[in-house]
Image (spheres, rainbow, N blue to C red):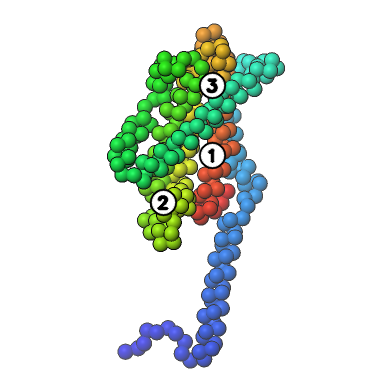
Amino acid sequence: MASTDTTDTTRPAGDRAAKDGGDLAGLEAGLDALESVQQGRTPLRQTLVEKVLPPTVAVLLVLAVWQALVSFGIVDDPSKLPAPSDVWDVLQQSWLQGELLGYIWTSVSRGLLGFCFALLIGTPLGLLVARVKFVRAAIGPILSGLQSLPSVAWVPPAVIWLGLNNSMMYAVILLGAVPSIANGLVSGVDQVPPLFLRAGRTLGATGLKGTWHIVLPAALPGYVAGLKQGWAFSWRSLMAAEIIASFPDLGVGLGQLLENGRNASDMAMVFEAILLILVVGIAIDLLIFSPLERWVLRSRGLLVKG
């Protein structure tokens, strides 16, 4: 029977070894080159075309449709749908009067501070639920239920308990954000491979040391996803609180601006508030959470471009 061995036995062993070494070196060089190409910085033109142009076109399209509805009389009642130019005039007036940044800062400062409080509470709570079976069985379902509860439901009891003040705003933010942060961390911990934990115990990383050096780094993708969702709940909770529990002493945030526009039947002011709420939410995500998420994915080899 003919041999199926494809090894070239007619060449000296030294030549074969050199050939194999050269092949391996070439393969390694090829893989390195491929990796370097994938991990290279994306050209500016490609970034503009792939990431900047699509949302810009979408925004322009929305504005064009909006203007067409007004210009062609499809919606000819300004009390229902103002023209984009009317909303721009209101924005410009707020800017010239020095009020625009005040609206934004009032809400953003509350939202970020409340989110930081939620972070300090939700992180240890999530670790406790993830690592202690009794605690998970006791309050795990409650956290899931609280996460699905609309944040606006907490505004009336918070007003009764704490009154019309900033403490009420922060309480609503906490009740909206803490369950999402905790559940995100629990999900991340559940996805940590058991091999990591066994390797950590073998190296002496147990208890708090194992949690800090093994569990938290491995659970980081799920944790970041929980943080991102927690911010979304924080922002929505704050807007609900500002709309329902508006009070002059609390200052005018974006939610109260929206309510003021409704009370005055000023749709241009209503759209001003809606656009500002949308822009701030998108800006926080793009400036904080999206870069954090990309860094986590890239550090684990899950994102090689961008």
| In this view, the mark in front (3 or 2) | 2
**Residue drawn at point x = 53 percent, y = 27 percent:** 111
Question: Can you give x and y, in whole percent of width and height, for residue 135 in the image?
Answer: 32, 40
Earlier-in-chain disc, 1 versus 3 = 3
What residue type is disc 3 on? Ile
| Residue 289, disc | 1
| In this view, the mark in front (2 or 1) | 2
Q: Which residue is mark 2?
A: 207
Foreground residue among 301 and 3: 301
Q: Secondary structure at mark 1?
A: helix
Toward the top, the furthest residue is 264
User: Does residue 84 show up?
Assistant: no
Earlier-in-chain disc, 2 versus 1 = 2
Question: Can you give x and y, in whole percent of width and height, for residue 34 in the image?
Answer: 56, 62
**Residue drawn at point x = 41 percent, y = 24 percent:** 151
Q: Secondary structure at mark 2?
A: helix
Q: Which residue is mark 3?
A: 274
What residue type is disc 2 on? Gly
| Residue 122, disc | none
Q: Residues within 10 Å of mark 2 (few under 14, many from 20)?
A: few
**Residue drawn at point x = 58 percent, y = 48 percent:** 306
Q: Residues within 10 Å of mark 3 (few under 14, many from 20)?
A: some
Q: Secondary structure at mark 3?
A: helix
